[in-house]
Amino acid sequence: MAAKAIELLREAHAHHRAARWAEAAALYARVRALAPKSFEAFHLSGFLALQQKRFAEAAPLLERARKLNPRSAICALRLAHARKALGQMEEAWAAAGAAVAADPTNADAHFCLGELAAARSGFVAAVPHFRKVVELQPEAADGWANLGVALAQSKGGDEALTCFERALALEPDNAQALTGRAFALQQEHRVAEAAEGFGRAIAKTPRNFQAWSARLLTLQYSDKVDRACLWAEHRAFGEAARASAGEADRNNAERAWCGAGEGRRLRVAFLSPDFRAHSVASFVEPLFAHLDRGAFEVWLYHDHPTVDATSERLRALAAGWRHFAGWSHDRVRQAIRGDAPDVLVDLAGHTGFNRLPLFARRLAPVQATYLGYPDTTGLAEMDFRFTDALADPEGEAERFHTERLVRFASTAWAYGPPADAPAPTRAAEEGGVTFGCFNNFSKVSDSTRRLGARGLEATPASRLLLKSAGLDVPGVAARCEARLRAHGIDPARVELLGRVSARASHLGMYARVDVALDTFPYHGTTTTCEALWMGVPVVTLAGDSHRARVGVSLLSAIGRPDWVAHSENEYVRIASELAARGERASGEGERLRDAMRGSALLDHAGQAAKFAAALQRCVAEKAAAA
């Protein structure tokens, strides 16, 4: 390199280290012109652009530098970060792999591969990369925290908790470890401990909205938290999200208002991490399939690494499809604003992988939430929440919501039964009655256990079959049995089953159940529909809020309000009477399936028309108020 170029490079580097970035950038550009084969000039130029988050500028500069020096691990790693920020996941993966190949001891490169593996293929693929990180840097808290997250999200178990404890021993305030540890506790159905853990994470990092949402979801499982407390917690989230977002903008609101009522199709976008083999997909696919494409242009935003056959079916129903897995909040925000939907519908609420903090920034003129979560979002910027009058009775529910409630149909769900569901049959077993509960065991609160104990006591020779993720893990099973025993349930009368990945096999297990016991206060939705479709009667206890009233709506929809209890005594009576009648052995299964076929739940075209009319009313209402 010429002496002049070397001199300029030294001067540029001095400006760079002193954060005089404009001066450094100008000098680096002069060096590149004088020495077009200077690795240092291109590498440092790209690094400077990367530091300033000018990723589109950084990537080609770093790519050029890597060609000049393929053995530089740090250059390849910086290129990986630039490509990842641009959403170019395959290119980022290749660059991170090149960094590891150039320097197998570079823990940062393995860390980057772990993050990319999680975004590309799911957390199970990230585990070996984060294991390598902690092997190379055993004293780095972030490595242990991320290994814990990958383990917790992919398989759970005590190893994840051990990783989080190791991270917190190294760095007591590590936000990832605090949040991850609470999540791992929730997976083990340790609800009170998980809620406390998420609260600790929020106290340390008040803008940790992942922890906020996880705490709110965890509190839904508890029968110790009343409606007023939940309302206060949701409002606190909404206020924190608004403060973090700053001044919201309206995303070219005139587009919706000027076109409303003039025959222009409304662009309606749905954002969800569950456009895959997931419960949410079972309820939205029937609506998407029947929405009037003459009135609506449907866009789907999928926000999860998994893309499967369900994803592809849904994608075929959409005019526009985006896959947001691994994208930053800023990039998602820019993409949605660029698409300019008239209505943006959140389908996650405070469940995992949600983007609620972005809704606080007003991404669309009309924003609504539906389906995925049994409560308010707490966001003042969320205009509407779709529900029905049984799940959210008129008058009382309004004061616990930031959204306006839209009761668009007699029941708020359109259920799509699995095509591979077996026929509703009863397995041949010797004597006795089997009560079953296939709900997430975190929903099996003290109230639910008390009801189960009374049901077993009222029905001699009966058994209880519980099925949930984690119940086949010895440590988790032992803790769950201890909780059952504390409520007078003899473990000898209980069978615990873990999650079954094959849906047909899961549904086939209902053949072993005579009566399904719904949980309280957090009812089942998918589990109730699955039980009914498999011919199993369900008994539910009505409460005072949506989480405790979903069963009321579903059972009323199929003409069985008599299976809805309004007291614990009535719950036990209904369960024992259903067991005594032996309806599963007398053709009740087929009758239940026929009842579902004739109900609003399976009137997909009718439900979609009502949902569509509600969307149009929401747009008209917002336009009139603008």
Image (cartoon, rainbow, N blue to C red):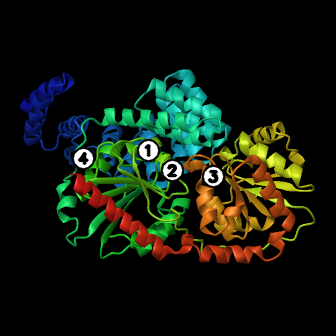
The answer to whether 506 is drawn above or below residue 346 in the figure is below
Left or right: 489 with respect to 510? right
Q: Residue furthest front?
A: 395
User: In which image quadrant can residue 564 be found?
Assistant: bottom right
Q: Please name the amino acid that badge 3 sits on.
A: His
Residue 319 position, x and y percent, is 32, 70
Neighbourhood count class around disc 2 (C-alpha, 10 Å): few under 14, some 14–19, many 20 upward: some
| Left or right: where 581 falls relative to 374 | right
Q: Specify the label residue 335 is tagged with.
A: none
Q: Which residue is mark 2?
A: 373
- Tell me, yes or no, whether the two marked residues, 4 and 2, touch with CB atoms within 8 Å: no
Which residue has dot 1 on it?
Answer: 377
Q: Residues within 10 Å of mark 1 (few under 14, many from 20)?
A: many
**Residue type for callout 1:** Thr
Q: Which residue is labeled 3 in the image?
A: 523
**Mark 1: secondary structure:** loop
Q: Which mark is residue 59?
A: 4
> Which mark sits nearer the N-terminus, 2 or 3?
2
Task: Where is residue 87? Give x, y as percent.
Answer: 32, 51
Q: Check disc 2 and give the amino acid type.
A: Tyr
